[in-house]
Image (cartoon, rainbow, N blue to C red):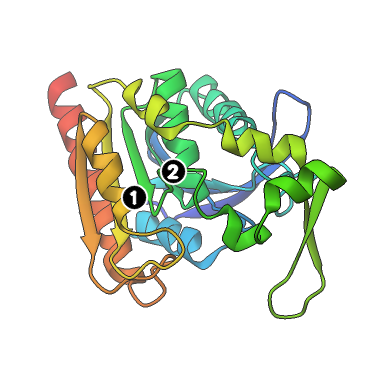
Amino acid sequence: MALSPPVERHRMIIPNTQGQKLVGILHESGTRDIVILCHGFRCSKDTTLILNLAVALENAKISSFRFDFSGNGESEGSFQYGNYWTEVDDLHAVAQHFHKSNRVISAIVGHSKGGDVVLLYASKYHDIETVVNLSGRYDLKAGIEERLGKDYLERIRKNGFIDVKKRRSGSFDFRVTEESLMDRLGTNMHEACVQIDRGCRVFIIHGSSDTIIQVEDAFEFSKIIQNHKLHIIEGADHAFSNHQEELSSVVVNFIKENLHQDKSTTS
């Protein structure tokens, strides 16, 4: 029996349309198929959840690429609140790089804000047929007061910005400008999801004990996305902290099923 080639990890830099360098890690399993992994808000390509998914895909002999959005992690650019469509453009730059390298993107996977980004991508570009949304937010008007405090709209209109402090240390974390807040408030996930092609398979995964984005958001997505599969992980929080193995298993199995389907329809 022939041995599978060992997985290699390569640091890669891919420029976005602004000329900023997006830094990522390619987990090369020797397959033409590749999965792109997208991190969440104030996170990076090295977040435990993203790294564990890359390793689980490695074990399934599937190549993957995890990268930092512009203004996050090691990538160039300044961090901006909102910025959903900018991150969609970053993802598109990454996807185009692999398309030009004659790779087949078998799936895009995003966690939290990254879950919204992969859905927005599917609504705009229609060139990837498997999308996995982990703990994405359905109503982007929700969850803002918890982060910015009460009367955030009045305060930001008065001062032009709000500085957000870290909850534990109280030190400066990031600045929210009026423009970036309006970017988030103007991003409509319902309208976008209606635009996703019926041929695109969307897997919606959420934890039943998520206190950051309620599990009800997953059910809202399932009402409007035509070709979807919904999976609730009982007892899991927003980051699937104590359910990493179960999460990795269901994601990898879904991607493998769709890979086999695609190969059988093209053969």
User: Around disc 1, counting alpha carbons within 10 Å, would you say few (fewer than 14), some (14 to 19), or many (20 or more)?
Assistant: some
In the picture, the quarter occupied by the N terminus is bottom left
Residue 76 appears anywhere in the view: no
Q: Secondary structure at mark 1?
A: helix
The residue identified by callout 1 is 217
Farthest residue in the right direction?
159
The residue identified by callout 2 is 139
- Contact between marks 2 and 1 (CB within 8 A): the answer is yes
Identify the residue at horizontal 37%, vertical 26% (top origin): 128
Q: Is residue 12 above or below residue 253?
A: above
Identify the residue at horizontal 23%, vertical 22% (top origin): 199
From the viewer's perspective, tell me whether residue 10 is left or right of residue 196. right
From the viewer's perspective, tell me whether residue 153 is left or right of residue 215. right
The three-letter code of the residue at mark 1 reads Asp
- Distance, label 2 to label 1, CA atoms, is 8 Å
User: Where does residue 167 sit, x and y in percent of width and height?
Assistant: 68, 74
Instruction: Judge by depth and name the residue closer to the eye, 259 or 68.
Output: 68
- Total marks shown come to 2
User: Where does residue 35 sit, x and y in percent of width and height?
Assistant: 41, 41
User: Where does residue 25 sit, x and y in percent of width and height?
Assistant: 59, 50
Instruction: Judge by depth and name the residue closer to the eye, 222 or 31.
Output: 222
Residue 156 appears anywhere in the view: yes
Identify the residue at horizontal 30%, vertical 40% (top origin): 221
